[in-house]
Amino acid sequence: MHEKTSRPQRARRLPRAVRERQILDAAVEVFSAHGYHAASMDEIAEVAGVSKPMVYTYLGSKEDLFGSCIRREAKRLLDAVAAGVDTDMSPDMQLWSGLRSFFSFVGDNRSSWLVLHRQALSVGGSFAEEVSAMRARSIELVAAVVVATGTRQGIGEQAEKSAEGLAAALVGAAESLAVWWLDHPDVSDGLLASWLMNLVWLGFGDLVQGEVWTPNFPATT
Amino acid sequence: MHEKTSRPQRARRLPRAVRERQILDAAVEVFSAHGYHAASMDEIAEVAGVSKPMVYTYLGSKEDLFGSCIRREAKRLLDAVAAGVDTDMSPDMQLWSGLRSFFSFVGDNRSSWLVLHRQALSVGGSFAEEVSAMRARSIELVAAVVVATGTRQGIGEQAEKSAEGLAAALVGAAESLAVWWLDHPDVSDGLLASWLMNLVWLGFGDLVQGEVWTPNFPATT
DNA sequence: GCTTGAAGCTACCCGCGAGTAGATTACGGG
DNA sequence: CCCGTAATCTACTCGCGGGTAGCTTCAAGC
């Protein structure tokens, strides 16, 4: 106790902005590991290297904190994808670029991805709506690309009608592949993206050319 | 209070098996609505029309109860899909049948689906592993169908190598479409399944025939 | 160097919800 | 008709974790 002379490394006093970042980082980590309800403010504070009242002073209640996490990580993800996509590119290249950016982000930010994909939806209320809305916007963007492809090539009625469903399927496939990736890390993000393009784009292409798979019996419900 | 004569309709005494079913039904409902942690045993008991000690007497702790839900609903889902698929059928028909059975089940059992898909994974520990394992088995089954298609048609090296990834993507697409469906109920299960077949099967087909989509620039990482 | 306020802490309150003790019926078999 | 036992309830305990009161210390400015 009488070593007060030159207490050296122990986490000096830092400006508010820095602490807020540290706390948010810790919160994303803990929320992604345990989920919203099972995560405790005490653990978040500890991981952040700060005491609990700091968390409340800077970021507000647990709900506020979670909201801040969601919004920050959502923005980071959307920005990352947007940065990789140029709307002047051809539809297939847009999809390809978007997928690569997406997988790359997930690879570098597993916690962010887990919070957004798993936790945010299972917490009822405004968060789920917020994230769902963001996801819906993404699906619409993809749907627009699909429709653009169809109209560009002349055909499209059938495809347009189901474009949103197809887009939802594609987005879901990407998300799911991202989760699968967590258990099979020995694959590059580029390979993941090309798998999906092979699987899905050729499907789209055939659809656009009027090719349709039908079951061997007549009625379908 | 002095109406004790002929207390009539109030939930007669029922045999244990019946109560257990009621409690499990209620638990699935409540867990799917609020998530594992936010769900309270009191609410489950109330929804089941039973008092709390009953729940503990018959189904054990909250974790035990959740486990029972997961296992029951997982079995119901797998049985439903298995019932619709005949391994003598051609691969495309197997996929088609499986998808229809899957969507049909989800349509009839939204709560079951939500519990399995959303809640089970966000509760750490044995449940997540259990559900993940089940999901992984499903993916392998689908992958086997994909591989079968490839070898049957003579080609397949490239496709076989990535079969599991493609299967993961397909399973994810189906799951995601199921979630999307919750917000767009004005679509039949058969239509959903045919969308996916159109989207995915033709993709698989082209892959098998050696057709490959490639980006316009050389290296891909 | 001394003051002032931001940065930071320890130590507490309190409600909610998991889990239980023990009394209390109602029904089936004798 | 009555007894035993399975079905069921009311009413509690208790710990965990969200949230806070109020004190302490460092460092920048005069």
Image: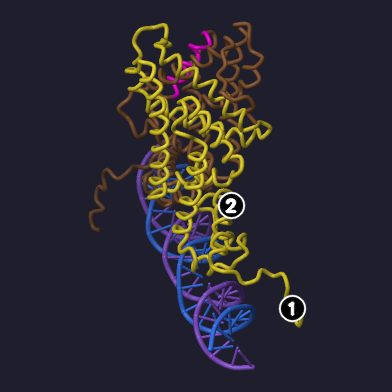
Chain colours: A yellow, B brown, C purple, D blue
| Residue B149 can be seen, yes or no | no
Q: Residue at x 56, y 23 (%)?
A: B216
**For the residue labelled by badge 2, is the local secondary structure a helix, a strand or a loop?**
helix
Residue situated in front as seen by the camera: B211 or B175: B211
Total marks shown come to 2
Above or below: residue C21 compared with residue A104:
below
Residues behind callouts 1 and 2 on a single chain: yes
**For the residue labelled by badge 1, is the local secondary structure a helix, a strand or a loop?**
loop
Using a 10 Å C-alpha cutoff, classify the residue at mark 1 as few (fewer than 14 neighbours), some (14 to 19) or many (20 or more).
Answer: few
Q: Position of residue B206 (x, y in %)?
A: 53, 12
Using a 10 Å C-alpha cutoff, classify the residue at mark 2 as few (fewer than 14 neighbours), some (14 to 19) or many (20 or more).
Answer: many
Q: Residue at x 57, y 21 (%)?
A: B214
Q: Is residue B92 magenta?
A: yes
- On-image quarter of the C terminus of chain A: top left
In this view, the mark in front (1 or 2) = 1
Q: Which residues are magenta?
A: B90-102
Q: Which residue is mark 2?
A: A29
Residue situated in front as seen by the camera: A62 or A190: A190
Q: Which residue is mark 1?
A: A6
Task: Name the kind of residue labelled 1 in the image.
Answer: Ser
Residue situated in front as seen by the camera: B30 or A221: A221
Residue situated in front as seen by the camera: B171 or D28: D28
